[in-house]
């Protein structure tokens, strides 16, 4: 009986964290893309998704705060990201999917720095995967 209880507890400890992760389509309109440009107020390099908070100036001059979610810090770290990726005051453009609830939130696909560098980091990290694939193909072609 003790073994069954122990196995039940271990199974719960292993499976419960996986239930905490969510699909972006549950929170964001994945068929719509929008871009916002603003000033970073905070960057949270956390799991299950890194978050960047920015202040965006509207056409009428009012400032609105936005939050954007990207990939997990664990995955971003493998692509060279760190907790110091953004500092308050940095100007960035975020492209992604807006909130289903209509709030100032988005799931980001790509981030562009003020110098024009695209750094990706969104859920799925498509730009990073493309760079890795292109580097692998270039190396393969070089060896042929």
Image (tube, helix red, strand yellow):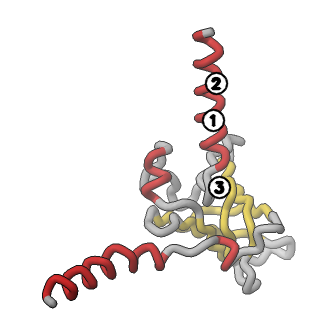
Q: Position of residue 140 (x, y in %)?
A: 60, 18
The numbered disc on residue 137 is 2
Could you tell me how far apart the alpha carbons at marks 2 and 3 are, in whole angstroms? 33 Å
In the picture, the quarter occupied by the N terminus is bottom left
Q: Position of residue 88 (x, y in %)?
A: 53, 61
Nearer to us of marks 1 and 3 is 1
Q: On the rendered structure, is 39 left or right of 97?
A: left
SS assignment at label 2: helix
- Location of residue 95 by image quarter: bottom right
Q: Relative to the observer, which residue lies in front, 86 or 25?
A: 25
Q: Which residue is mark 1?
A: 131
Q: Earlier in the sequence, mark 2 or mark 3?
A: 3
In the picture, the quarter occupied by the C terminus is top right
Q: Extreme left residue here?
A: 2
SS assignment at label 1: helix
Q: On the rendered structure, is 123 left or right of 18?
A: right
Could you tell me how far apart the alpha carbons at marks 1 and 2 are, in whole angstroms? 10 Å
Q: Which residue is mark 3?
A: 91
Nearer to us of marks 2 and 3 is 2
Nearer to us of marks 1 and 2 is 2
């Amino acid at each position: 009986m003790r073994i069954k209880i122990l196995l039940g507890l271990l199974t719960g400890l292993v499976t419960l964290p996986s239930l905490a992760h969510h699909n972006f389509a549950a929170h964001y309109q994945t068929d719509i893309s929008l871009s916002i440009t603003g000033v970073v107020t905070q960057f949270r390099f956390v799991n299950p998704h890194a978050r960047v908070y920015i202040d965006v100036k509207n056409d009428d001059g009012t400032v609105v705060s936005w939050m954007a979610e990207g990939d997990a810090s664990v995955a971003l770290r493998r692509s060279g990201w760190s907790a110091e990726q953004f500092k308050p005051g940095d100007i960035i453009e975020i492209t992604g999917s807006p909130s289903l609830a209509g709030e100032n939130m988005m799931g980001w696909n790509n981030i562009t720095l003020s110098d024009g560098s695209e750094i990706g980091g969104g859920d799925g990290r498509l730009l990073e995967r493309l760079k890795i694939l292109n580097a692998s193909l270039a190396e393969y072609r070089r060896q042929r």
